[in-house]
Amino acid sequence: MTEEQTLSAPLGFLGIDGGGSKTLAILIDEQGRELGRGQAGSANYANVGLEQAKASIYQAAAAARAQALGPVEVRNAWIGLAGIDTPQARHDFTPHLRALAPHVLLTNDAELGLSALPQAVGIVLIAGTGSIALGRDLHGNIQRSGGWGHILGDEGSGYALGQQALQAAVRAADGRGPATTLMHRVLEHWQLTNPYDLISHIYPLSDKAMIAQLSTCVLQAAREGDAVANEIVHHAAEELALAVSAVYRKMNFAGQPLALALCGGLLIHEGAFRQQVIEQLDRCLTLGEIALVDEPARSAAQGASNLTSITHWQQA
């Protein structure tokens, strides 16, 4: 871009959500209007490494800029990446992102949801394939609960719902557990005919997303009165509320009502389940604003546009 073009180009703000399966970049203008979006493969730093994560980020950002009608001067960029869990990881990766914008904020992808809250202060609760609660106070202190992955934790997540549905189904088939419609629903979902087909269907793939997709079966069964499914769903809501409460106890919100951002497919697209979680939280916390964050990348772009100095915000 020439100096003359730069002077005349409108300002843009970039938000990038780099997860385990895809990377989404959204570019907005000063009025918050979307100028373009682009998608690429995984940017999970811990899984695919620096070079592949960097390639996905720049590919998604380039695709978003290509959709804009004319040149755009990107002023600030907020990038959230899965696998960025330590100050050292941020220190190692940030220099590779300087070409995206003059001011770049790199955080864990879970922090993107905070951008939907005033001053990015409050707690974000994410329940999709995995689960995590993460909070930030006015002093910039960050605390989290969950996010341990499907082997160590991820309670209340889509994966946990799916796994517990499978366990309840096979226990019922064996006569070790109460009757439930979950086996029928799971077999129908995967187009299988025999419960023992589950063994060969599940173990060779060991796909977290595949298991997490069974959460729809559990939630539907609960809505239709299946007692076993209802217990699984109720327990998931309790676990998510517990994660938020654990973060709240670690932080100082000065007695103010808790601003809460909700992210992830289970909380965005499953209204009844979301309401269960909120009701659980109402019993132990005073809730303030509740924001539903359907696209963390867009929320991050909006957050980047509202930050007068990203460098100062990082140091806060």
Image (cartoon, helix red, strand yellow):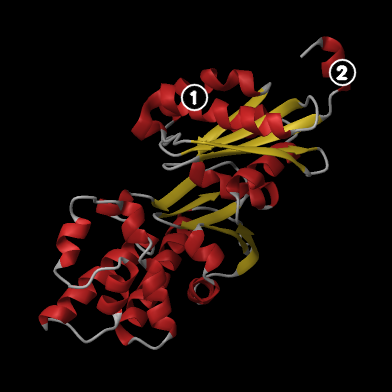
Q: Which residue is mark 1?
A: 55
**Going 52% across and 23% down the picture, which residue do you hit?**
94
The residue carrying pointer 1 sits among few (fewer than 14), some (14 to 19) or many (20 or more) residues within 10 Å by Cα, namely some
- Front label number (1 vs 2): 1
Q: Which residue is mark 2?
A: 7
Residue 257 % position (x, y): 63, 64
Q: From the viewer's perspective, is 245 left or right of 252?
A: left
Amino acid on which disc 2 is placed: Leu
Task: Decide: is 230 above or below 109.
Answer: below
Secondary structure under badge 1? helix
Amino acid on which disc 1 is placed: Ala
Q: Are circles 1 and 2 on residues that touch, CB within 8 Å?
A: no
**Going 24% across and 50% down the picture, which residue do you hit?**
205
In the rendered image, which quarter contains the C terminus?
Answer: top right
Q: From the viewer's perspective, is 204 left or right of 294?
A: left
Query: Is residue 47 something that shows in the picture?
Result: yes
Residue 200 % position (x, y): 16, 58
Query: Is residue 238 something that shows in the picture?
Result: no
